[in-house]
Amino acid sequence: MSEPTLTATRLFEGVWEGVLTGYSEMPEIVATHLDTPLEDVSVTQDGETARWLVQVPVPASALSDGLQTIVISDKRTGATLNSFTILAGSDLDNDIRSEVALLRAELDMLKKAFRRHCVETM
């Protein structure tokens, strides 16, 4: 059996999805948020292959101000297979605004340098 690998594929309509390899039989997967197990985690086999489709619904409790992390692990061994984070709320607003302000300042600097270059080369 190869080393288990859980690869994220997408987060769509509140459900995180991934592909799990490295298990020959049905794995027992648990997802936790703040050390609390999440409900409705599903694992289904992808046809006849040794690939498993994992779906983790994001609970409403994970949607709050700040950074929230959901950890996905093997229930039998306790090994962490993957994790994902959600950043929301007012903390995000401040980060985005400061980043946009920095980008605007850099763009203004580039515009001035480009205009000066165009004038000097004519």
Image (cartoon, rainbow, N blue to C red):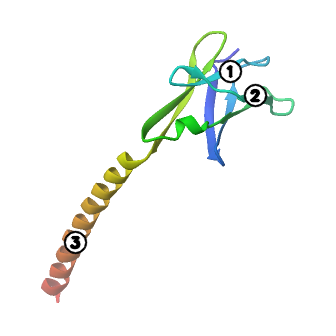
Residue 115 vs residue 85, the one in the foreground? 85
Residue 10, percent from left and from top: 63, 44
Q: Amino acid at mark 2?
A: Val
Give the residue at mark 2. Answer: 43
Give the residue at mark 1. Answer: 29
Q: Is residue 37 above or below residue 44?
A: above
Quarter where residue 119 is shown: bottom left
Q: Amino acid at mark 3?
A: Asp
Q: Quadrant of the C terminus?
A: bottom left
Can you tell which of label 3 and label 2 is closer to the viewer?
A: 2
Determine the secondary structure under disc 2.
strand
Circles 1 and 2: CB distance less than 8 Å? yes
Give the residue at mark 3. Answer: 108
User: What is the crowding at mark 2: few (fewer than 14 residues within 10 Å), some, or many (at least 20)?
Assistant: some
Question: How far separated are the C-alphas under marks 1 and 2?
Answer: 8 Å
Badge 3 or badge 2: first in the primary sequence = 2
Identity of the residue drawn at 35% across and 55% down: 96
Quarter where residue 33 is shown: top right
Identity of the residue drawn at 53% across and 20% down: 35
Q: Is residue 33 left or right of residue 55?
A: left
Q: Amino acid at mark 1?
A: Ile
Quarter where residue 67 is shown: top left
Question: How far separated are the C-alphas under marks 3 and 2?
Answer: 50 Å
Residue 109, percent from left and from top: 19, 69
Determine the secondary structure under disc 3.
helix
Identity of the residue drawn at 72% across and 30% down: 40
Determine the secondary structure under disc 1.
strand
Badge 3 or badge 1: first in the primary sequence = 1
Q: Is residue 76 above or below residue 30?
A: above
